[in-house]
Image (spheres, helix red, strand yellow):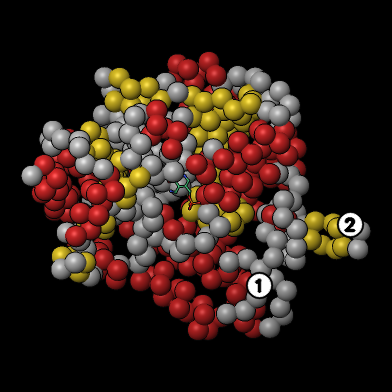
């Protein structure tokens, strides 16, 4: 079991007062705080090793190249990829998904084909496919979210039926950033593979919270963001199964991604370098590697266990407040709680919480169509990470009572 009180000491940003109260940071689904190990890695890189990678033959460039390529190896280990060449550095989950839509999609999707998503997708796993479908004349299908006795869950019977030709690709969120729903990614990928359908996992919300093993999951692609896993912003990676990645054309052209070129044509490097045009985000890739070391030192099973406990506690505590409607399933929830306060707009909830030093997020959480479907155009969200405590959940619950009282006076 992890000791969040101890771990908090590694995260300098947590140790501050906001509006005269100790900060309670519950906006981790938007971005997590960074441990000293990550901050120090950035500091060290810029103080000592700063140089461009791959093309230099001098000491600093060699160091930067070694550390950058080590980060790729580290990312491969982190998700148990068979080969470091299956890891493409990106700006984050969004860019990874766009990369697939613009490369795999460009080659494989044409008029009449279908792309299957779920109704719980973040805009970053919706809009790239909308753009692709519009370009190619393809159709998007959606596994419905249904609301019943077990809360808001995915309609798994519908999924079984929809997951069939002419669907060519199934892209789904592993852990929903709004519903706290945890999809059975391994089962979804197995069903897709049986039916000859390519599977893509949006693992933005799961990567920093539980062990992930791409070979065990059986996915074809998996996209993540560094900043949701204690790493820096502006860096993430895409895992792509080698057989698929190798066949894909580049999507951005520039330096670094080619072996040779004339004025007319170019010969591209093999994957993953062919997908990394231009100077990459060297410093942040190296610091992401430090974040992965940190998470592994804490233990990803222990983090998942902490998430589950805190999430169950929050569900119980906030569930006892009869003026809240909590979105998502009733059980098996991930470490976040999204709620609607009756009679109070989510933005007011979030602004008032801030007065008490609590950081929440309010709005549609980049799930606009889903929020509309659930008749909750705006909601507030508390999302947890390894440094959050049950006492912070108590403070949240007490504050929500005060906010409700304030607005009903
Ligand atoms: N998918 C999910 C489920 C997310 O929560 C997010 C971030 N909120 C993203 C994708 C996009 O991540 P990024 O903005 O880091 O690309």
As measured in the structure, the alpha-carbon distance from the residue carrying label 2 to the one carrying label 1 is 24 Å
Q: Percent x, y for residue 123?
A: 50, 41
Q: Nearer the viewer, residue 297 or 229?
A: 229
- Using the rendered image of the protein, determine whether residue 86 is visible from the camera's viewpoint: yes
In terms of sequence position, does the residue under pointer 2 or pointer 1 come before the other? 1
Q: Percent x, y for residue 331?
A: 27, 30
Q: Nearer the viewer, mark 2 or mark 1?
A: 2
Residue carrying label 2: 265
Residue at x 58%, y 66% (from the top left corner): 281
Residue at x 39%, y 31% (from the top left corner): 372
| Quarter of the view holding residue 392 | bottom left
- Position of 280 with respect to 28 (left or right) is right
Q: Percent x, y for residue 46?
A: 52, 80
Above or below: residue 120 compared with residue 205: above
Query: Callout 1: 10 Å neighbours few (<14), some, many (20+)?
Result: many
The answer as to whether callout 1 falls within 8 Å of ligand 1 is no
Element class at badge 1: loop
- Using the rendered image of the protein, determine whether residue 217 is visible from the camera's viewpoint: no
- Position of 370 with respect to 73 (left or right) is left
Residue carrying label 1: 53
- Position of 199 with respect to 18 (left or right) is right
Above or below: residue 369 compared with residue 304: above
Q: Percent x, y for residue 245?
A: 69, 45
* Label pair 2/1, CB-CB below 8 angstroms: no
Which quadrant does the C terminus fall into? top left
Residue at x 34%, y 53% (from the top left corner): 28
Element class at badge 2: loop
């Amino acid at each position: 079991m992890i000791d969040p009180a101890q771990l908090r000491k590694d995260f300098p940003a947590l140790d501050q007062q906001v509006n005269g109260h100790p900060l309670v940071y519950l906006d981790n689904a938007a971005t997590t705080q960074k441990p000293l190990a990550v901050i120090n890695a950035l500091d060290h890189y810029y103080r000592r090793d700063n140089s461009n990678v791959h093309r230099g033959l001098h000491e600093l460039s060699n160091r930067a190249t070694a550390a950058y390529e080590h980060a790729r190896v580290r990312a491969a280990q982190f998700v148990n990829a068979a080969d470091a060449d299956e890891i493409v550095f990106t700006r984050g989950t969004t860019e990874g998904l766009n990369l697939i839509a613009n490369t795999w999609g460009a080659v494989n999707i044409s008029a009449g084909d279908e792309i299957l998503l779920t109704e719980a997708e973040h805009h970053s796993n919706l809009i790239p496919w909308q753009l692709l479908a519009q370009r190619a004349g393809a159709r998007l299908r959606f596994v419905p979210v249904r609301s019943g006795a077990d809360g808001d869950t995915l309609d798994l019977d519908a999924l079984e039926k929809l997951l069939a030709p002419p669907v060519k690709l199934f892209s789904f969120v592993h852990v929903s950033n709004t519903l706290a729903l945890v999809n059975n990614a391994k089962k979804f990928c197995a069903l897709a593979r049986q039916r000859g359908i390519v599977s893509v996992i949006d693992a933005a919300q799961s990567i920093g919270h539980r062990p992930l093993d791409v070979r065990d999951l059986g996915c074809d692609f998996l996209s993540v963001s560094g900043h949701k896993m204690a790493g820096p912003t502006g860096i993430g990676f895409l895992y792509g199964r080698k057989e698929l990645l190798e066949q894909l054309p580049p999507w951005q052209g520039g330096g670094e991604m080619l072996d040779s070129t004339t004025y007319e044509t170019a010969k591209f490097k093999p994957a993953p370098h062919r997908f990394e045009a231009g100077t990459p985000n060297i410093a942040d890739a190296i610091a992401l590697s430090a974040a992965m070391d940190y998470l592994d030192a804490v233990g990803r099973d222990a983090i998942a266990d902490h998430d589950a406990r805190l999430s169950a506690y929050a569900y119980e505590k906030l569930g006892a407040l009869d003026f809240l409607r909590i979105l998502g399933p009733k059980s098996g929830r991930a470490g976040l709680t999204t709620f609607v306060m009756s009679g109070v707009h989510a933005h007011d909830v979030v602004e008032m919480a801030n007065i008490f030093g609590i950081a929440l997020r309010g709005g549609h959480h980049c799930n606009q169509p889903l929020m509309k479907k659930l008749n909750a155009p705006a909601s507030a969200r508390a999302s947890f990470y390894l440094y959050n405590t049950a006492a912070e959940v108590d403070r949240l619950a007490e504050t929500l009572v005060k906010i409700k009282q304030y607005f009903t006076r």
